Amino acid sequence: APLTQESSVPGLYACGEVASGLHGANRLGGNSLSDLIVFGKRAGEHAAQRARNLAPPPIDEDQVKASIATMLEPLERGEGENPGFIYDEMRDMMQAKVGIIRTKEELEEALEDLKAFRARADACFPGTDRRYNSGWHQALDLINMADISTVAALAALTREESRGGHTRDDFPVPDEDHWGQHLNIVWMDDGEIKIRQERIEPIRHDLQVSLDEVKAMIKERAEEQGGGK
């Protein structure tokens, strides 16, 4: 809901880039601060208002026990690879293959690499200490890192165009006919990450007019600075 920041999941409020943001595909550093302040305040106020009107939910003891078991599992493996090594290698691989300039070959390699990283993450061992154990945190983070990295690589592979901060060396120009009108939707289905495209709603006419005016102004200024070339 645009006025409350409530998502399509009842009770889940979102702001900033997780809610798409206002700056398009290539936000400059620091430019997100204004919408974070505005929509963060709006999301917080409406989430608090909803919480005040809700009764305390029942606690599912089975879910609590399952969550605890998931958190403790890395400590109970007894042996395995240091999660810190996996953490660093995954970060470096993503920087190399899913970084600024992307290609089909490297993105496909990254997806295969991530399957191996996920398997290593499931078997890593941070030791048994529960105090000040950063490796334990990394062991838990690695699962989410592998999933989110897979989402990013899969979406980048599917989007066969360049747009904003997404640069495909093998597809160097925007594809307005398709990707100018569609978005990737990624979801988890029984442990498997899947992707599809959905057509976006047309932009409001008054907003389109404003955007066209801004584009014309930018083009005019660029021509003036370039001596009309």
Image (cartoon, grey):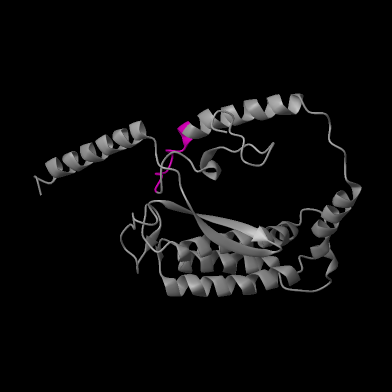
Query: Residue 220, image x and y in percent?
Result: 17, 40
Q: Quadrant of the N terminus?
A: top right
The magenta stretch is 26-34
- Figure check: 201 above or below 167: above
Q: Is residue 114 magenta?
A: no
Query: Residue 212, image x and y in percent?
Result: 27, 38
Query: Residue 60, image x and y in percent?
Result: 88, 45
* Viewer can see residue 57: yes
Which residue is rendered at x = 66% and y = 39% of the image? 12
* Viewer can see residue 129: no
- Figure check: 12 above or below 125: above
Judge from the rendering whether residue 130 lies leftward or rightward of residue 155; answer left or right. right
Res. 135 image quadrant: bottom right
Res. 80 image quadrant: bottom right
Which residue is rendered at x = 72% and y = 73% of the image? 81
- Figure check: 210 above or below 108: above
Which residue is rendered at x = 65% and y = 59% of the image? 188
5 vs 128, nearest the viewer: 5
3 vs 115, nearest the viewer: 3
Judge from the rendering whether residue 196 lies leftward or rightward of residue 82; answer left or right. left
Query: Residue 142, image x and y in percent?
Result: 67, 62
